[in-house]
Image: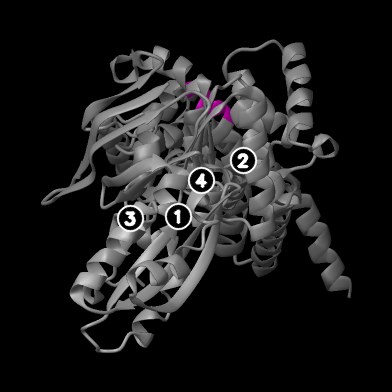
Amino acid sequence: MIEVINLSKSFIDKNSTIEALKNINLKVEKGDIYGIIGLSGAGKSTLIRCINRLEEPTSGSVVIDGQDIMKLKDEHMLKVRRRIGMIFQSFNLLSRRDCSKNIAFPLEVSGCHKNDIDKRVDELLALVGLEDKKHSYPSQLSGGQKQRVAIARALASNADILLCDEATSALDPSTTKSILALLKEINARLGITVILITHQMEVIKEICNKVAVISEGEIVEQGATFELFSKPSHPVTKRFIGDKSLEGTWVYHAKDKSSRLYKLTFLQESAHQPVISQLIKTTGVEVNIIAGHISNVQGKSYGNLVIELSGASETLENALQYLIEKNLYVEELVEDERVV
Amino acid sequence: MNELYNILLKLLELMPQPLLETLYMVVSATVFSVLFGTPLGIATAVSEETHIWPHKSLNKVLNLLINIARSLPFIILMIAVFPLSKLLVGRRIGTTAAIVPLTIAAIPFVARLVEASVKELSWGIIEAALSMGANVRQIIFKVILPEALPSIVSGITLTVINLISYSAMAGAIGGGGLGDLAIRFGYQGFQEDVLIGTVIVLLIIVQLVQFLGDKIYKRLLR
């Protein structure tokens, strides 16, 4: 388990202080694929580097399996780093070593015996499906293959934590998918805890079981991925989700102030009931359906429906009450809070 | 036709000894300056505040030393190190003695080139090595040196060519070599054919060095 406790980091310039991270708290359980999503400049790169102390936090601590790594001296820290693999957006392979020698690097560093290294390298090449590229140099590989080598290298010294720094941002969509599948497989088969930072929503949707949204150095929202996606509350989260059901809504919505706009979220259990027709029958409210969209997060789906309700204020209240009773997540859309 | 033949014959007789002297000075000075300049350059690069071995005051001292040595004109440096040459090789002037100022002039040059080669490496590969638990020594020998090698080789090529031109200057004060030949016969002895011949030979050497340097650079680049 990895706990980030009250972590802050400021960069002190000559005449100004930039607070890159403000009081971050995270709890990553063993076996999680934990996603941290944020726009560029939000502080996610700094945050992930604090976890293996490539960046020194200004205050706070990182506790891995009960051990506060901020208290570790140099040599001990180097040992802990060998347990924490890391992969990068730009792969960062050594250009003058072939694949096998790149994967061997962390093993050489930790003083492994030559024969053990050879054996382990072959195992890892098989794990990432690059047995035939053993003696190829990075310049001869595609982006996806380079990232596979990087993953093999990161896991070489039996890491049980893998940090991914925008690992798929430089890859095309289909390569991204295959790398994510590999990460998922590694997580499932070897029980490796994965912490990844990204600005790509698809990455989170595809593999993360938990997610934290970071904005301007603060975690603004965190939780299980499906929950967070189906019921986003912070504007930044909403922006990331880029709610398709809202596209065009404001264009449609007239200046008629007597009607109200609502966004309904149907989670799995409520998705199969004819809620809208019953709503009309029971309360007599006027319903105008404006937009609808169904999203899929890791095999679970949820629907969003934007409706316009009109009627007497009592009728509107009843209608609202009814929707809440039906276990729908109801949000009133107010124009000045519009999310694009 | 006969005249040209005679000139060639004369050059063939005059040239070998100074040519060997030049090669001897340049090769020795290159070897020593690379030997001392490379560690100096690496130390300067990695001791910077944001690099893997931050040592602010050491970095300042190294930079100052390199700058001082680089700002001395070679012709003055040559004379200034006479006592040191005497101490190291037992003579103030002569071909072997000239290796001392040549090396001293080239060390800071090599150091700056190596420093630049190290600094132009992407920080990502160093960060990756750090993330794998490599220590400073391992990063220098397993990451920085091999990755910067092609660029360092380009730098050495440049150094050799510079040393060829410096060695001609060393010739002026008793270092021997092609420079000495050109000055004595060509300038003082009014034998323009020797002067032109020397220039052509120097030109060929420089071309060869550059060609070889580029070849090695390309081979190293993956």
Quadrant (top left, top right, bottom left, bottom right) of the N terminus of chain A = top left
- Say which chain tag 4 marks: B
Marks 1 and 4 sit apart, C-alpha to C-alpha, by 26 Å
- Image height of B40 relative to A166, above or below: above
Marks 4 and 3 sit apart, C-alpha to C-alpha, by 59 Å
B141 in the magenta segment: yes
Marks 2 and 3 sit apart, C-alpha to C-alpha, by 54 Å
Q: Amino acid at mark 4?
A: Leu
Q: Earlier in the sequence, mark 1 or mark 2?
A: 2
Q: For numbered disc 4, what is the local secondary structure?
A: loop
- Badges 1 and 2: C-beta atoms under 8 Å apart? no
Instruction: Return the x and y of residue A242 as percentages of the image width and height.
Output: 43, 65
From which residue to which does the magenta span run?
B137-142
Q: Which residue is mark 2?
A: A93
Marks 1 and 2 sit apart, C-alpha to C-alpha, by 23 Å
Q: Which residue is mark 3?
A: A324
